[in-house]
Image (tube, rainbow, N blue to C red):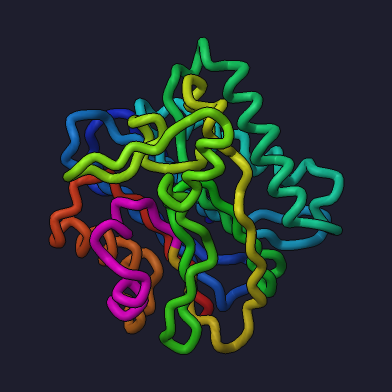
Amino acid sequence: MKEKACFSTPVTPEARKGKSRYSKRITHGSHLMKGKANHAMEDCLVSEFKMLDDHELGLFAIFDGHMGHDVAKYLQEHLFDSILKQSDFWTDTKNALKNAYQTTDKEILEQSFKLGKGGSTAVTAILINGQTLVVANVGDSRAVISKKGVAKQLSVDHEPSKEKKLIESKGGFVSNLPGDVPRVDGQLAVARAFGDKSLKRHLSSEPDTAVEIIDDDVEFVILASDGLWKVMSNQEAVDSIRNIKDSHSAAKYLADEAVSRKSKDDISCIVVRFH
């Protein structure tokens, strides 16, 4: 079963669940929730299994748009296609991800007249034959796995304060005003993203990547936008759903818990469970 969801108007919570057709022990579920901010829903996600060259691929992604949802929607529709078309996808998957991320970013910038001046973070996870998980991300959406109940973060939070020297070397600056988070050029609260044409000279779209072998110790994977991680630690997220066997119910629980902890941002969450 597959899910591709993105909302541009206020919605009631929606969720989907599915399972691998070929790896029967793997299930996935997702949930999206509109935040309290005075703008349309800007999160999109992909959660599906597909066959390619006799291999089963699980394709999972969270796209967290800002200044509109158009860039997130473009990523939802095009990023995985770009990744899977890379000539070295099977031989050097991490490099294929990096090339596809940057190629797609160029396409977005070239279409800024159509897509607008906004941007999007992204975290993608590709599960190959139920055995190898390859993660890439730009921004602060996050991928976390549970190994025997211990949380392990696979993505990198690209915070402006951590990349201040790089941003300054490109002619930009990082603001750090009292009561606010650090921002690139006083505007964007992440150091890497797709789009954002006006900031692109100082903003990277190069992803960090990681590979994780899915052994018997790995229980599940969580992908979520920062609407979750602003109010919940990695370990808290793992602990809260470890005993929830249904992936869809687990994803919904995380979103509901984030709201109960006063998260006002859009929240999107995917849980992939290895039974």
The image quarter containing residue 136 is bottom right
Answer left or right for 58 relative to 144: right
Task: Give the image location of residue 28, x and y in percent.
Answer: 47, 64
User: What residue is at 33 percent from the left and 43 percent from the top?
Assistant: 182
Foreground of the two, 132 or 202: 202
Residue 233, compared with residue 79, is above or below; it is below
Task: Give the image location of residue 74, x and y in percent.
Answer: 53, 30
Foreground of the two, 98 or 187: 187
User: What residue is at 50 percent from the left and 83 percent from the top?
Assistant: 147
Q: Is residue 37 magenta?
A: no
Answer left or right for 148 relative to 105: left
* Residue stretch rendered in magenta on the structure: 223-240
Residue 100 visible from this viewpoint? yes
Q: Is residue 228 magenta?
A: yes
Answer left or right for 230 relative to 213: left
The overriding secondary structure of the stretch rendered in magenta is helix
Answer left or right for 228 relative to 143: left
Task: Give the image location of residue 30, x and y in percent.
Answer: 39, 57
The image quarter containing residue 185 is top left
User: What residue is at 86 percent from the left and 45 percent from the top?
Assistant: 87
User: What residue is at 18 percent from the left and 46 percent from the top?
Assistant: 264
Residue 14 visible from this viewpoint? no
Task: Give the image location of residue 23, x and y in percent.
Answer: 64, 72
Question: Which residue sits furthest top?
Answer: 113
- Number of labels in the image equals 0
